[in-house]
Amino acid sequence: MSSPPLAPPAQPDRPAASASASAAQSPGSPTVIRAAGVSKKFVAYHKRATSLKERFVRREGASGEDFWALRDVDVQIGRGQTVGLAGANGSGKSTLLKVLAGILRPTSGEVAVNGRIASLLELGAGFNGELSGRDNVYLNASLLGLSKREIDRLFDSIVDFSELRHKIDDEVKHYSSGQYVRLGFAVAVHVDPDILLVDEVLAVGDEAFQRKCLDKIAQFRAEGRTILFVTHSLDLIENMCDRVLVLETGNLIYDGQPAVGTKLLRQRLGSLPVEGGAVPYDLSPVKPTAVTFSRDPGGAPQVQYDPGEQLTVSVELDLTDYAPQHVYLHVDILGQGEVPIWMMETPPGGISPGPGIVMVDFVVPRLPELLGAFAVNVRVSDAATGHPVTVRRFEDLFGVSGPQVAGLLRVDYQAGLRR
Amino acid sequence: MRWELLRNLVRKDLKVKYKGSTLGFAWSLANPLLLLVVYTFVFQVVLKTGIPRFGIYLMSGMLVWNAFSGSVSSACGAVVANANLVKKVRFPLLVLPLSAVGFAAVHFALQLLVLFVVILGLQYSLFGPELLLIVPAGAVALLFTVALSLLLSALNVRYRDTQHLLDVALVAWFWVNPMVYAYGLISDRLGDWTWVYLLNPMAVVVMTFQRAIYDPPPGNSTGSSSIIADTGYTFYLEHLGIAALISLAVLFLGLRVFRRFQADFAEDL
């Protein structure tokens, strides 16, 4: 499987504007990695029965501190994509990579991989310090699935890539750490994978080696192979990736364009305090851009209402950057002093808007007999994960007024002198 | 099954083990030699078991036992010892316990060869049709060893007590094979219950190896009881058949447990 070396990476055949989870895939490119509803729970080590005694002494159900490293992650990666996997430490990046590599079994959900996969979770894993570089190349390559004949054929190329010909018959324990990872990387990239999974291994080694690794990845990319790599480098995501996945505490919070993903990451990794971990709306991939009030959905805007009249609160959402499959909206109607008067939300499970700009209408058939000026606070969450996406309090007001001049409520009453 | 990978792993273990040592493989003879000296002194000189050519009797049974116990013991820890690999690289995990068995098998073959050379050097008879018994006996030994190795290596990942339990069990197990004593002592004592003793596949394997290699004195007797179980062939073939069935059952169980546990190895380690 080799496309002409000058073929551009698979970017241009993708509609530039939309980058939703489904649209991020170039049309016609078959899915090579499909993860559906993948969750991974780690049970705290001391909670697990690790001896026969515990097995018998402890009854099931005593496990407490479970830790969900991944929650219901859905990812589909098409052939030829270069995908960055980003997120803070402990967000589940490596766990996701290991699940996709088939090293960890997901607690629930399914993973299907189509193609020869090579995972660089650690360079030189399985090297034995007592053996020579040559022996280790053979051993490591056979672990990664190459036959002796294939290794014989590739051996010179591996050694050349590692630039370690002068030391290849020395024991690996005498290698510097840089030389060690160089040899490991050289073996791994010669496995000729269709899909390359790379953990943060590119952070090691000197600059020259890093450049070499990146060149190799660029070459893989040009050859139309699929690459998924974990990185903390926003530059790398912007320059190397067609797509970025952002994880946070095990949830996939963003899947789409690198430019948007990095913006989100900068926000997330910076320490701007936002309610509930949500992003300020102007930086959010899903933007509540406007709120309008009218009598009927799509009707003429109107700000003044009588009690008992119909009101439609319309929230405009900009989903051009990112369209989660299920959006959950929560609207608070705020009275004086930010007191929430009532709230409205989308049905359980959220709504499923397409990409683009959408309007969500909340229709109140009869306004209550509550007078005053009201503002609107909109909270957006990803209904699939329950994770808050953003929150915005709009300045726009609508008013409900009646014949009486003071007070909040109009109450039916009769006034008279007792006889 | 990736045989090439298995071969590479066995070769790696051998290389690592003998690297930098001048005597190399000769060291693997040191342990059986020491046992030979000790057991010969205790059982021939002190306890006077009355088994002629005791050294050959002992070695013909004990080499295969040593191969078995060495295999099982190191296979048991094989997955745990390679934790780093298991957590970082995807490869068929079955090769880990199997390579421990392969490693011991290589030693066994070489030690057996040395034993043959010694027997020929002492001008005892070695080559007869009975020598062919080492083929089925070796096969059953391999089968049983692999079966138990798979089972234990998988169990040990989750229940680390397995290794300790095994080490204790192997010490006891040593004595329920007729290696340092004559088989007759057991069959005389157990009588009709000898079949229970023979349910131990290793006892049958050990006895068959003795029949194949050891040349009993005329009458096959220490004076009070027989030395080897039987001077024919069918007794051995029958019992090897039973041992093979037991081994297959263990293999079935071992494979099932291994397959079931292996998906969680990376997490349990």
Image (cartoon, coloured by chain):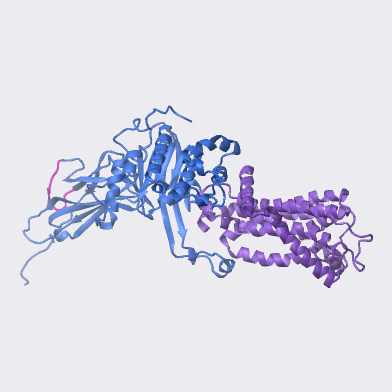
For the C terminus of chain A, which image quadrant?
A: bottom left
Q: Looking at the image, which residue is at 10% across and 64% down? A: A414
Residue A266 as seen in the image, left or right of residue B28: left
- Toward the viewer: A304 or A57? A57
Q: Is residue B218 above or below residue A191?
A: below
Q: Looking at the image, which residue is at 45% across and 50% down? A: A177
Q: Looking at the image, which residue is at 29% across and 52% down? A: A268
Q: Is residue B228 above or below residue A208?
A: below
Q: In the figure, what tint was chain A given? A: blue
Residue B84 as seen in the image, left or right of residue A74: right
Instruction: Note whether residue A389 is visible.
Output: no
- Residue A139 location (% of width, % of height): 57, 45
Quadrant assignment, res B68: bottom right
- Toward the viewer: A202 or A299? A202
Q: Which residues are magenta?
A: A300-310
Residue B150 as seen in the image, left or right of residue A30: right
A225 magenta-colored: no
A301 magenta-colored: yes
- Residue A247 location (% of width, % of height): 36, 50
- Residue A250 location (% of width, % of height): 39, 53
Residue B196 as seen in the image, left or right of residue A49: right
Considering the whole magenta stretch, tell me its main secondary structure: loop
- Residue A68 location (% of width, % of height): 42, 57
Q: Is residue B136 above or below residue A49?
A: above
Chain drawn purple, letter?
Answer: B
- Toward the viewer: B43 or B83? B43
